[in-house]
Amino acid sequence: MDNNPVVSIIVPVYNVEAYIEECLESIINQTYQQLEIIVVDDGSTDKSNELVKTYLSDKRIRFIEQENKGLSGARNSGLKVATGKYVLFVDSDDYIRVNMLTELVSRIEEGQADLVRFNGSAFVDGMEKVVDHDYYDFSHRLEEKHIYREDSFQANRRTFVSPVYLYLVKRSVLTEHNLLFREDIIHEDELFTPQLFLAIQTMIYVNAAYYYRRYRENSIMTIQSTAQLQRSFDSYLKIFKELELVYQSEAYNKEQKKLIKRQMLSIYNGMKENKLDKEEKRTALNHLKSIKLKDKVYLVLQKLRYKMKIV
């Protein structure tokens, strides 16, 4: 067991001048100090770059400036230079609890796990939105002090959420499986996270909210222009097809394939619910032969159960 393993924290930055200081302060002031803080400015056009530079007296910070490549490209740039035993992703408009890494590193080292899951807490900033606070709480399905091995596939299938900032992962898992973010899409976590779940051997869960997720206007997830809807649909379609190839591979067992199929159905449903022209969607969806009638019935039943739950 390494008493003070380095944690590489990768922070992609793009036009977040209103939030970047709060984000970096929450990282720099961690009670756990063995950090490699990799900040990647992805071609910001506001004052984000200038604000980051005021923190460079902290020798733990490695600052990368690049032309805009998108969130995936920024994260990949960080991964390519990371040297820590563990990797944590933090989005630059969010922040983390000050004792997060003291507690998580202790737990992941004690359990000798590849990955630790934890809870998050969502909040709304400057917009009207109802937040599902249970979305980031997994205590109803995951057990603390349990070392998940083969049963991790079922556990992650039943509690699947894609955001990579909810996982502290051993970097060797990423390097050994050559895991990077696909750069020609948005919703990249929807592909990366199931690939990560397939790669790990052991997992633990800590029932505490360490990550604070900000919902704000003009973010990738809140813009609903026609162009953005088209980009979202096209990205989901690419993700689905890549997952479909994984699902058809003979390299995975039954439980692993259930996890993959669960995500394929989620992506299919995301495309189906997209507000683009119905005929355009129907043409694309009809070509997805791996979605059977029983899958469509299952999705309808799941939607009905959800409506009954919130009524």
Image: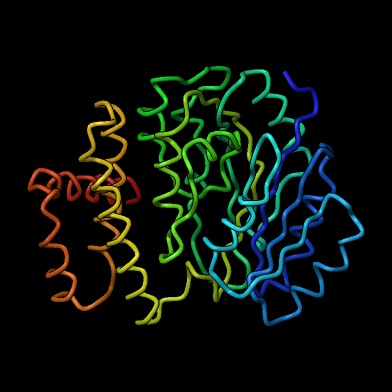
> What is the quadrant of residue 124 in the picture?
bottom right
**Figure coloring:** rainbow
Residues 107 and 140: in front is 107
Which residue sits furthest right?
57
Which quadrant of the structure image shows residue 62? Answer: bottom right
Number of numbered discs on residues:
0
The vertical placement of 279 against 299, above or below, is below
Q: Position of residue 245 (x, y in %)?
A: 24, 46
Position of residue 237 relative to residue 228, above or below, is above
What percent of the width, then of the height, locates residue 21? 79, 64
Q: In the shown orientation, is residue 129 left or right of residue 288?
A: right
Vertical side of 4 occupied by 15: above or below? below
**Quick one: which residue is furthest to the left in this view?**
293
Seen at 64% across and 76% down, the residue is 43
Q: Position of residue 130 (x, y in %)?
A: 49, 61
Q: Position of residue 198 (x, y in %)?
A: 40, 34
Is 270 in front, or is 174? 174
Image quadrant assignment for residue 46? bottom right
- The relative height of residue 34 versus residue 89 in the rendered view (above or below) is above
Residue pictured at 72% horizontal, 18% vertical: 1
Please indicate whether residue 259 sits to the left or right of residue 205 in the image. Answer: left
Drawn side of residue 144 relative to residue 65, left or right: left
Towards the viewer: 20 or 196: 196
